[in-house]
Amino acid sequence: MLVLYHMDWGGTDERLTARDEAWKNACEKTEGAEYLGRYVPWNKRYHWTYVTNVKDIQTWRKATQNSEWKRDPQEIINSELEFYAGPQ
């Protein structure tokens, strides 16, 4: 299952890099979760999109619980979360 997390970023480059590392580490701690990277979406209005491959929704939730990154409310201005199931 692919998870796309689109967001508009209002923080510093240093904090964005810290968020990248925190999410990568959370996925490494979570069995069935793989961080695929942060991309620029050309077909969405957002600044960035994080792409993660997870076994299922429960795995996604576990990964978010394993993240040590603490969000400043002014950093992520808008966001959207999309889940895509693969071929069955």
Image (cartoon, rainbow, N blue to C red):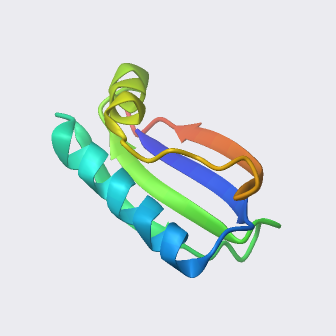
Front in this rendered view, residue 76 or 42: 76
Q: Is residue 60 left or right of residue 3?
A: left
Q: Position of residue 70 (x, y in %)?
A: 50, 44
Residue visible at 56% across and 79% down? Answer: 13
Front in this rendered view, residue 72 or 67: 72
Q: In the rendered image of this protein, does residue 32 appear above or below residue 75?
A: above
Q: Position of residue 46 (x, y in %)?
A: 76, 65
Q: Is residue 56 left or right of residue 27?
A: right
Residue visible at 83% across and 67% down? Answer: 45
Task: Give the position of the N terminus as an image quadrant.
Answer: top left
Residue visible at 36% across and 40% down? Answer: 67
Q: Is residue 81 left or right of residue 79?
A: left
Front in this rendered view, residue 70 or 42: 70
Q: Position of residue 7 (x, y in %)?
A: 69, 58
Tally the marks: 0
- Which quadrant holds residue 59? top left
Q: In the rendered image of this protein, does residue 43 appear above or below residue 53?
A: below
Q: In the rendered image of this protein, does residue 6 appear above or below residue 73?
A: below
Q: Position of residue 74 (x, y in %)?
A: 76, 55
Task: Give the position of the C terminus as an image quadrant.
Answer: top left
Q: In the rendered image of this protein, does residue 6 appear above or below residue 41?
A: above
